[in-house]
Image: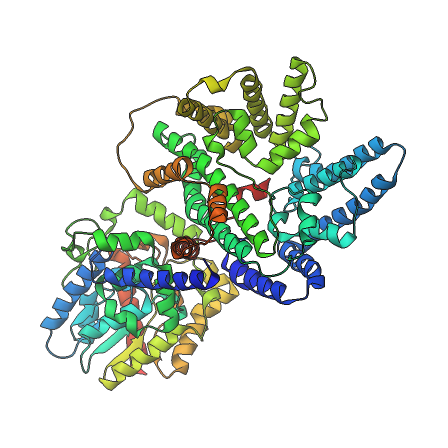
Amino acid sequence: MSIKNFILFLFLTAILWVVTIFGQSNNPTLMSQWIFDAYNKKEQTAKKIKGKKVIVVAGSNALFGIDSKILSSYFKLPVVNDGVNAGIYLPLILEISKRIINKGDIVLAPLEPNMYSYNHKVGVQVIDYLFARKPLFFWDLSFKEQFYILWHIEFERIWKGYNYRGGSPLTAGFYGAFNIDQNGDQINTSLKFKNQGMFKDLERHHKNPEHYGAEFSTEALGWDYLEKFVSWCNKRDVKVIFVPATLMKHPSYFNDPIEKEFYDKKIIDEVKKRGWTFIGKPHNYMYDSSFYFNTNFHLTQKGKIMRTRQLIKDLKSSLKK
Amino acid sequence: MLFNTYQFIFIFLIPTVIIYLSIPREFKIKFLILVSTIFYSLWSVEHLLILLSSIIINYFLARKLENSILNQRFLLFAIISLNLLPLIYYKYSLFLTFSESSPILPLAISFFTFQQIAFQFDIYKKKQQVKSFEEYLFFILFFPQLVAGPIVHYKELIPQTKEKNWGEYQKDYFNMGIILFSIGLFKKVVLADNLAPIANYAFANIETISNYDAWLGIFAYTFQIYFDFSGYSDMAIGLALFFGIKLPINFNSPYKARNIIEFWRNWHITLSNFLRDHIYIPLGGNRVTLPKQAINILITMAIGGIWHGSGWTFIIWGILHGLILIISHRFNWFKIPSPIAIFLTFFSVLLLWVIFRADNLSDALSYYTILFNFQAIPINIEFNEILLLSCSIIIFFLPNSLSISQYLKAKPKLHWYHSLFVAILFFIALKTLALAPAQTFVYFNF
């Protein structure tokens, strides 16, 4: 044994590791199934629409919090709610949305606040979805993201990638295409579907507010992805309008100077500085916990209508100017 | 800085080794003192002052002890008491109700206190002479063994620095260092840190866990504490080899012991030796009547227990080990077939870990009640079961680090597959570190 051999074998082990990861790419996993089903259903809806349409691009705050029918009556255009899960992060969300964006469409982007601070540190859902459903997108990511993903994929995830024998659309549970209407909105979110566990989850979220303001950076990688996405849309005559996401109200978002400034100014200023459109004030989209269903981003049926009306009100007043 | 972090491995260790190998021999000890001081100060500068004060005071008192003609015994007693005072204040003030809150325990205080007491004993017994202050600083501060042992004697460490080739790159030392460090890192990061949640869950939910979860929990803790501390010791021994120093072994398959005497000869060997040499033998050891000998064993083991932490659980754990030791001394275990003896010893140790791990005696008793309230075992082999089974195989059927070192030492030439094996272990450990924040070593709390 020599140090040279040790380093050589360490390097070869790393290569073997990468080969093992790619050996299971494109194999479906249970974790990614509902997201895949939801996007498929939304794609089918979008394909049926001839002519211009409005597409809502975001995570699950849009899935649960946009009433596409009400929004459609305002725009007098069909609306496809492409919001699914913020857990797959900004690069994948933007990339996947491109499959249904056509010339002349309008993109409404109520991106979750942490999307603006996206850096290379992705979570397990991104890694899972990427290798199970969209492995080629790996090569479009930055080297830093690629390295991070290869180094952070769990042994268990690879094992599942090789061993999962499912792949058919889910038909039961809470998340999935079967619980989404033809516009792409989540259904069955009225109070009667809210159980004790959901109340407890909301209480837990309320006790542990987010600190997105502290994480915000104008240098974050997320802005590069947004730049590329907006430029891609502009080339297709697609208008992108950034609007606030909904987030369960918490006093710290109004009292903590860093958090307050983040929602009042920082996101809006940075979007506008780049020559893009931002309509609405994030604080106006924060509601009491009773309007949320099971997380601090998921509105109930009632909350969804209230949020959509707020959005229309802001769009009306802003577009009038 | 923990050994099991990227910062330690890539920012601290690798540059330290490179610089160490490239500087002239006369600066090597100075350099190791400097990096060891930096290593400790990254935990706490305030506690570094305590450590350095303790070293300075001990050095000058050792000189005094060496040169004193009268009352040497009294002086030794005074020095030992002086060493124990900070330990008692930081570790036991809450337990002894000196204070209503426990001060933050300086890292390694139990280890550097015992190491210095052992040194003073050696001076008293004329086994050792006080040499230069620089060497004494190095003897205590040398970072691989500073934080959690092995507890080293001066004569085991310093003479190595006088050897002809010391400080040069020695291929055998280096290879063994990489092997032991990689094995240790794997034991800690992949095994111990994955066992910890199973044990933590069981001991945090004593009121609600099932009989099955309680057994899983105590097996997990039994394996966790072994892999955690023996992993640390392997890493420490491996690290020291990078600097041309052989540290004494601390573990030698203790769970394969055929009786509790053998267990203590193979578990935390340097602490067991310290307790034997500096408490049990001075109390009279085996040279007294049987009842006195039994009392000596109980005192020694009670001190060994409380060394691990302040609280009745630790004292009782030590005393119970002492009781089993007394029985073992009176009973010829070698008449029992080996597998049965190993099984009985292992289960005694396992059951006693309950008291050691529980927050208090009441929790320990509740835990025992659940353990022996047998219920049907659910047959579902999941990650936890596979992990425990793998750990059992490693502990009972695979060679330990000492055997691996001896095997490799005996081989005239190491082959490519040795490198491959070590590279895979190291890679898996590094990879596992990416997914979970580095967890401190169990023995850092002691």
Determine the residue positioned at 50% across, 48% down: B409
In the image, residue B232 sits, relative to residue B244, either above or below, namely above
Quadrant of residue B210 within the rendered picture: top left
Front one among B103 and A8: A8
- The percent coordinates of residue A163 (x first, y second) are 21, 51
Q: Is residue B137 shown above or below A283?
A: above
**The C terminus of chain B appears in which quarter of the rendering?**
top right
Residue A196 image offset from top left, x and y in percent: 30, 42
Q: How many marks?
A: 0
| Quarter of the image that includes the N terminus of chain B | bottom right
Q: Nearer the viewer, residue B89 or A199?
A: B89
Q: Position of residue A244 (x, y in %)?
A: 34, 69
- Camera sees residue B95: no
- Residue placed farthest to the right in the image? B70
| A261 or B391: nearer the viewer | B391
Residue drawn at (45%, 31%) of the image:
B256
> Which residue reaches farthest front?
B412
Quadrant hosting residue B20? bottom right
User: Compared to B91, does B161 lie above or below?
Assistant: below
Residue B379 placed where, x, y %? 26, 32
Q: In front: A15, or B383?
A: A15
Tell me the residue at 55%/17% (across/down).
B327
Q: Is residue B110 left or right of residue A25?
A: right
Question: Which color mode does the image show?
Answer: rainbow
In this orientation, does residue B200 appear? yes
Q: Would residue B44 appear left or right of A131 to someone viewing this image?
A: right
